[in-house]
Image (spheres, rainbow, N blue to C red):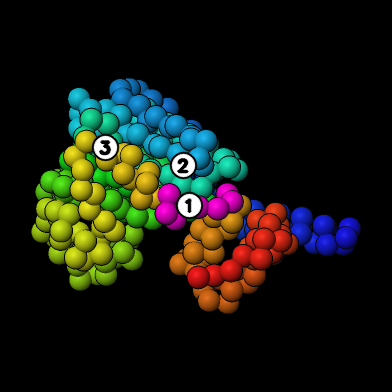
Amino acid sequence: MAVSFWRGLLTRRRVICLHQRRHSLYSISHGYNEAEIKVKLAQFPGGSINLHKGDNGIAELCINNPSRMNAFTGTMMIQLEERISDLENWQLGKGLIVYGAENTFCSGSDLNAVKAISNPQEGIMMCMLMQNTLTRLQRLPLISAALIQGKALGGGAELCTACDFRLMAKGSEIRFVHKQMGLVPGWGGAARLVHLIGSRHALKLLSGAVRVDPEKALDIGLADDILPSDNILLEEALNWITTYTKGAPDVNRALKKVILSGRELHLEEALRTEKDIFGTVWGGPANLQALSKGTKHK
């Protein structure tokens, strides 16, 4: 029994270390100074990133700056990183809904902050911060869905690609407007878009700054569902994601981790990681409870 306990503990620690090592893309070795860029961004306040963690294991993350179509100010970029850190440490979490306040998703970066950090060095540092943050969002051991109402533009379009699923309201749109600003995506949206819909569709959306409505998004695989109601969309999104978050938190989190390893690692390493994650739930409470009940599959 003692040997089994310590073997399980070592396996769990190894999996945690593997997961934490892959959280972020950039560090000081890449010339990235997080403290420095946060000091700069803190000079541009406004809006907020609000997080509510429900007793059902589903969190709600609200992009809240409605007077600017929920554009990210400097302080909101900092707050998003802080909220993701909170979610990484939420052991009872199973799912996450990302949405915007007052019936619009997000219009990207606030222009006041963008103009103030227009030199290339600071722009790249901001890019590194947001790539780190959105990569950590994508790698959360939570099943995530972006609830898109109104417009998801520029950085807002990039943000929704960092979620596992995208749910679109009627009349909403996703649009990568970077080219019209003389830019390309910098928060990781282009790379994620290629993985989601393939390079041909991604090139069309980026080079043409195409307005993607819910029907087109569903057709090309960018959206996962179109929500029918106009009034209780957050409730509908919560009901939708609950289909995929039933069961014990540790099992849900383990499932998300094996998907991440399969997507991001070479096959051999993904298989070894899957084996290690399997070891964290085999003989665990949920597994033993299912066995004791004689659970049958229908």
Q: Which residues are magenta?
A: 242-249
Is 209 on the left-hand or right-hand side of 58?
Answer: left
Residue 91 at x, y percent in the picture:
60, 43
- Looking at the rendering, which quadrant does residue 270 occupy? bottom right
Q: Is residue 243 magenta?
A: yes
Residue type pointed to by label 2: Ile
Of circles 3 and 2, the one toward us is: 3
Residue 232: give its label.
3
Q: Nearer the viewer, residue 169 or 235?
A: 235
Where does label 1 land, which residue?
245
Query: Secondary structure beneath disc 2?
Result: strand
Q: Residue 264: image x %, image y %?
A: 47, 66
**Residue at 20% across, 71% down:** 200
Q: Amino acid at mark 1?
A: Thr
Find the residue positioned furthest to the right.
Answer: 2
Position in image of residue 189 (x %, y %): 30, 54
N-term mark: 2 or 1:
2
Picture disc at residue 58: 2
Residue at image position (31%, 25%) is 47
Please name the predominant secondary structure of the magenta segment in the image. Answer: loop
Give the SS element for disc 1: loop
Specify whether residue 253 is in view: no
